[in-house]
Amino acid sequence: MAVDLSSLLGSSSSMPELPWLQLVLTFIVVVNILHTYLDMRQLKAIKLPDPPASLKGLFTRKLYDEAQAYSVDKWWFGFWHGIYNLVETVLWLQLRIVPWLWYSLPSWLPQPLAAIVEDNEIVHTVAFMLASSLINLVLSLPWTLYSTFVIEQRHGFNKQTLGLFFSDLVKSCVLGAVFIPPLVAAFTYILQRAGPWVPLQLWAFALGVSLFFLTIYPVIIAPLFNKYELLPQGSLRDKIEALAGSLSFPLKKLYTMDGSKRSGHSNAYMYGFFNNKRIVLFDTLIKECSEEQVVAVLAHELGHWKLRHTPINFVMSQFITLANFLLFAGMRTAPGLFESFGFDKSRPAFIAFVLFQFVVAPVDEVRLLLLLLLLLLLLLRVLLLLLLLLLLLLLLLLLLLLLVIGFITNVVSRRFEYQADGFAVQQGTGKELREALLKLEETNKASLNVDPLYSAYHHSHPHITERLAAIDAALKKGQ
């Protein structure tokens, strides 16, 4: 006898009809108010006249002023971009643009394509997602251009030309046109034939897609945008291979990437499954840091591998994905969901998932709390009045716990960073890692002052002062 997983969440038809749109709009506004409060605290920290006491003497006044100016510019850009996104989201929802786009799309197309779109829900869904992606691209383009060619250019980070920018844009559009249709079609097909195991079917599909892109991105997609070359034979390569060998890291390829053709920022990363690992170094990292410092940065990255941080994060993300699909299966037929967002004529399968995203994900930082909240609502069998009163009480609780959720989601990531730094110290590269962090902080013009509340909520990495203190403590302990 098959067990209907979605039935474990209760029958959606037995739920009272909720004002979904009003709840979503209210929550979006509340979250933005809280974010603005944190942002204002951060702006005050950025504008402090001097760096933290532990960093005094490590940076010149000129470098501090440049980093401060860059941080202020980015803050104001983020502030106005956030207001724009808030207004845009509210208008999309309040003016029922999503249902308007869905219902009017066939009339934009020539025959016989229009008839096919109107008669076939899968084709209609694919056309809808392509149109939505194009609209979002056009709306976000001015902001991307301003960020790249005004802010990043002003502070010496942008290295790309308009020609390269639009070349990348065209490539991204082509990739979207290639991958969006089959993925959306397959997702919709699963939903249309939703059986008792639909949450597991959707999760298995999402897992397969994740593994597929993790496999093809570094070998097919990434080379379309950047040039990857094997790191030449020499002392740097010898030192990296010696470090990898000492840790039994299955290094197969060691690449450099021409990150400098787009940006002055630096990075290094590794990828690959099982015994087929590759390391990629940005050319900017090699240029800005000494060989010993580059090795120290990689010792930190290899610490994440040795301590199994990547698979732990991956498993955690899969649990969250499965929780999303379980909740979606329980509420996709909730009374009033489609009607609240303007879908009065039909209930397209994929649109249910789009609306679900509006309901549970106004902001990513509180996704887990929203999942628990909505799961509780789906399990309740109460009158509408009592349910609305409960919603108000839970909303008050949400306001109190909102920041705590941000803290919790960053605790694991911060702990992993400390552990990876400690691992680098154990490999005898602590002093060089300290120097590399300071060098990268300088070249990336990062803000040296940070509000602790803002940092705890938004930052997945400890601040530079916290990392240096932990490294110094580990070095002292090892003496």
Image (tube, rainbow, N blue to C red):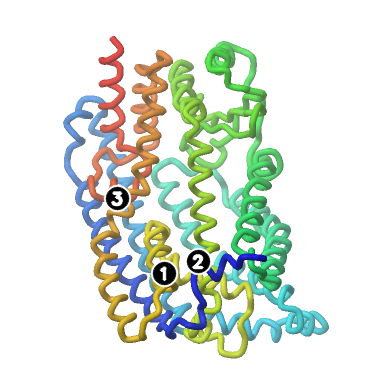
Question: Is the residue marked by circle 1 packed among few (<14), some (14-19), or many (20+) residues within 10 Å?
Answer: some
Q: Which of marks 3 and 1 is nearer the N terminus?
A: 3
Which of the labelled discs sits on residue 276, or is there none?
none
In the picture, the quarter occupied by the C terminus is top left
**What residue sits right under mark 2 in the picture?**
327
| Residue 85 appears in view | no
Q: In which quarter of the image is residue 387?
A: bottom left
Task: Report the Cα–Cα distance between label 3 and label 2.
Answer: 40 Å
Q: Residue 72 carries which label?
A: 3
Residue in the picture at 65% in, 44% down? 217
The numbered disc on residue 374 is 1
- Amino acid type, label 2: Leu
Q: Where is residue 406 in the image (x, y as percent from the top left)?
A: 33, 52
Q: Earlier in the sequence, mark 3 or mark 2?
A: 3
Against 409, residue 284 (above or below) is: above
Front label number (3 vs 1): 1
Question: Where does the image place residue 418, in percent across and percent down from the top left?
Answer: 35, 31
**Residue type at the position of mark 3:** Val
* Amino acid type, callout 1: Leu
Residue 6 position within the rendered picture, expressed as x and y whole percent measured from the top left = 56, 68
Q: Identify the residue at horizontal 61%, vertical 59% (top origin).
A: 200
Label 3 – label 1 distance at C-alpha: 38 Å
How far apart in space, not on screen, are marks 2 and 1 (Cα)?
A: 8 Å
Image point (30%, 16%), residue name: 475
Instruction: Establish if 38 lies above or below 315.
Output: below
Residue 459 left/right relative to 206: left
Q: Mark 2 or mark 1, which has the lower sequence index?
A: 2
The quarter holding residue 119 reads bottom right
Q: What element carries label 1?
A: helix
Q: How crowded is mark 3: few (under 14 residues within 10 Å), some or many (20 or more)?
A: some
CB atoms of marks 2 and 1 within 8 Å? yes
